Amino acid sequence: MAEGELHDLGADRSLLLVDDDESFLRRLARAMEKRGFEPEIAESVAAGRASVSRRAPAYAVVDLRLEDGNGLDVVELLREMRPDARIVVLTGYGAIATAVAAVKMGATDYLSKPADANDITAALLATGDDLPPPPDNPMSADRVRWEHIQRVYELCDRNVSETARRLNMHRRTLQRILAKRSPR
């Protein structure tokens, strides 16, 4: 799929992008516009819900963790207002339980960040039982481990001892991992 190539989007090309990472949001909006979508952006759950209430889009890409709450609130409202919408949930924290929750709420697919515009377009346009192709640049096992540790650390309010206990690892080992830069 070449950048700028138009796809069979149907008559309604409306796309809602909800993410609190402003630079990512703007880049993604430009890339999706080049692919034939008509993007509208929202930087919070409140803005995403307001946008859906005004005009429920045919497509949506929603970040799971936003500063003002959970992106699944936007997914749920969109699914109520437009049952045929194609929705992809993005997250920096890949977790099976969250993926199941997102799909049960009505998401079409679930992608871990960093996802590029080609991955997102493939997921939005996948039909029937077609699974989108595997990502061109999946996270390495080291990166997935690091993301998991970071998520548990954040959920434990950045308490190293509590995080180490929950991950069943030595506190000093955890401190060394947290001191290093994230793997690619």
Image (cartoon, rainbow, N blue to C red):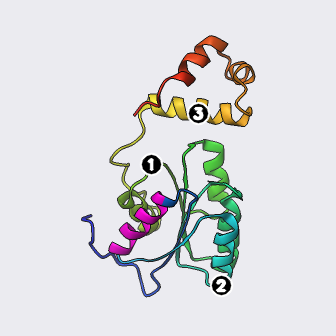
Mark linked to residue 54: 2
Front residue of this view, candidates 161 and 135: 161
Left or right: 3, with 47 as reference point: left
Front residue of this view, candidates 163 and 99: 163
Q: Position of residue 67 (x, y in %)?
A: 67, 55
Dominant secondary structure of the residues highlighted in magenta in the image: helix
Q: Note whether 48 is above or below 88 in the view shown.
A: below
Left or right: 78, with 60 as reference point: right
- Are the residues flagged by discs 3 and 2 in contact, CB closer than 8 Å? no
Residue position for label 3: 148
Q: Secondary structure at mark 2?
A: helix
Q: Quarter holding the N terminus?
A: bottom left
Q: Amino acid at mark 3?
A: His
For marks 3 and 2, the one nearer the N-term is 2
Q: Position of residue 41 (x, y in %)?
A: 53, 71
Q: Which residues are magenta?
A: 23-34
Q: Quadrant of residue 141?
A: top left
Front residue of this view, candidates 11 and 132: 11
Q: Position of residue 183 (x, y in %)?
A: 43, 30
Residue 24 among those drawn in magenta: yes
Q: Secondary structure at mark 3?
A: helix
Residue position for label 1: 114
Residue 169 among those drawn in magenta: no
Q: Residue at x 67, y 58 (%)?
A: 104
Mark 1–mark 3 Cα distance, whole angstroms, equals 15 Å
